[in-house]
Image (spheres, rainbow, N blue to C red):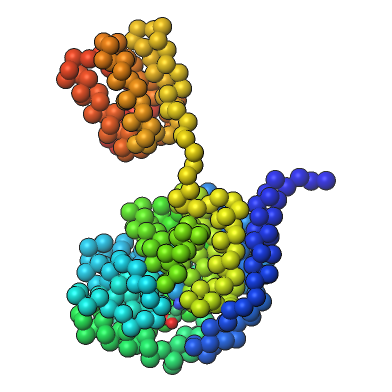
Amino acid sequence: MTVDLRDPIRLALARVVEEGRKLEGGDVASYIPELARADPDALGVAIASVRGTIHETGDSDTEFTIQSVSKPFVLALALEQAGLTEVTRHVGLEPSGEPFNAISLDEATGRPFNPMINAGAIVTSSLIDGDSAAEKFAVIRRGLEAFAGRQLDVDDAVFESELESGDRNRALAYLARSAGTLASSVDVATEAYFRQCALLVSARDIAVMAATLAAGGRNPVTGERVVSEAVARWTTAVMSSCGMYDASGAWMVRVGLPAKSGVGGGVAALLPDQFGIGTFSPPLDAQGNSARGVAMLEALSNEYGLHLLMHRGEPLSPISTLDTDRDPIVARLRGELVFSGAEEVLTRLDTLARDGVAIEMDLEGVTRLGPAARLLFRDALKEASASGHDLTVNDPDGLLDEAN
Ligand SMILES: NC(=O)CC[C@H](N)C(=O)O
């Protein structure tokens, strides 16, 4: 028999799909008439690692319209083009605690509360480069294709259906326009937004899109840098506070994965530096989130301990050996050092330094120095030399250099 060591991963997905299937209830969206045709029994999950490996099960290749799952990705494009300051002049970063289609503007500033609700997302689309709806949509489409790593088509029937039935969204755009926060005409903004919502994706696509954010803005499958690390971080932060509408707070407590849902039945979620997940199941709960998608992600997070804020236990000491027989004493450091590791090293070495012992910090076994560790070590070396203490470093890979 041939062995397949990836089986446990598929099994994990198969288990959550089974969990999802058990859940009855929820209704397929029908306020956009064309969406009512979705198959309520379709169910798929895909997970894409930050190394670009994809595991999937169920209807993970079935296409559906991306709808609001587009919002964080278009926000990322706007942030990349215009920067955080300019974007936040037009749209806020605060959870609204209101439904996705709320008539919601911050009284004081005229800005929609955040870019994950419709009012804010329409403003975000208005900020995208281009004068006409066609120009803006072309930029959006190219950007979302870069996130997904493939070409995406528009479901024209869904687009037409929303164009026809989208008066509430037009009303939101008029409100933003009257408050001075919409960056284009109402027609340009809403048409670009409706087209963006009608892009066809699969659970697999949105897993790769989320994995691109998890990988700091670089698509792990194609290798293309889509947005900067800062933009990926900002976008993920907005997803974690506002991605599930008025269920966002409870979501972060129960599931703990920054996520975004859409009325087409998709949910994209991610764990930074690890993976992106896409789920697809059209029936929606009262908040307009995919009922089975929510159940599946909650099961996955609980069973496999995936909560972003999970306590990981006491970290391994960053000092692998302390060779006190030598002069200078050699402290061999290991692994990845972030703030806490550097703090531990300096605190332990301080006791020795106070006794007047000469010390060498050996960084040979260090795989990575985070910015905090680099700064703290550089300052410690300066401090030692200013006070005439003998503290040296062996840094064969130049980890302390500015550029690394
Ligand atoms: N929550 C959603 O997915 C809403 C998107 C949809 N296009 C709308 O604006 O109503």
Q: Residue at x 69, y 64 (%)?
A: 18
Q: Residue furthest bottom?
A: 164
Q: Residue furthest right?
A: 1
Is residue 386 depicted above or below 113 in this figure?
A: above
Q: Residue at x 46, y 34 (%)?
A: 315
Q: Is residue 284 left or right of residue 20?
A: left
Is residue 351 depicted above or below 69 in this figure?
A: above
Quarter holding the C terminus? Answer: top left
- Could you say where residue 190 lies in the image, as x and y percent from the top left? 35, 83
Q: Residue furthest left?
A: 386
Is residue 241 shown to the viewer in this render? yes
- Could you say where residue 316 lies in the image, as x and y percent from the top left? 47, 31
Is residue 231 depicted above or below 243 in this figure?
A: above
- Could you say where residue 61 lies in the image, as x and y percent from the top left? 62, 68
Q: Residue at x 51, y 59 (%)?
A: 255
Quadrant in the rendering for residue 345: top left
- Could you say where residue 137 lies in the image, as x and y percent from the top left? 38, 76
Q: Residue at x 49, y 87 (%)?
A: 32
Q: Is residue 386 left or right of residue 190?
A: left
Quadrant in the rendering for residue 47: bottom right
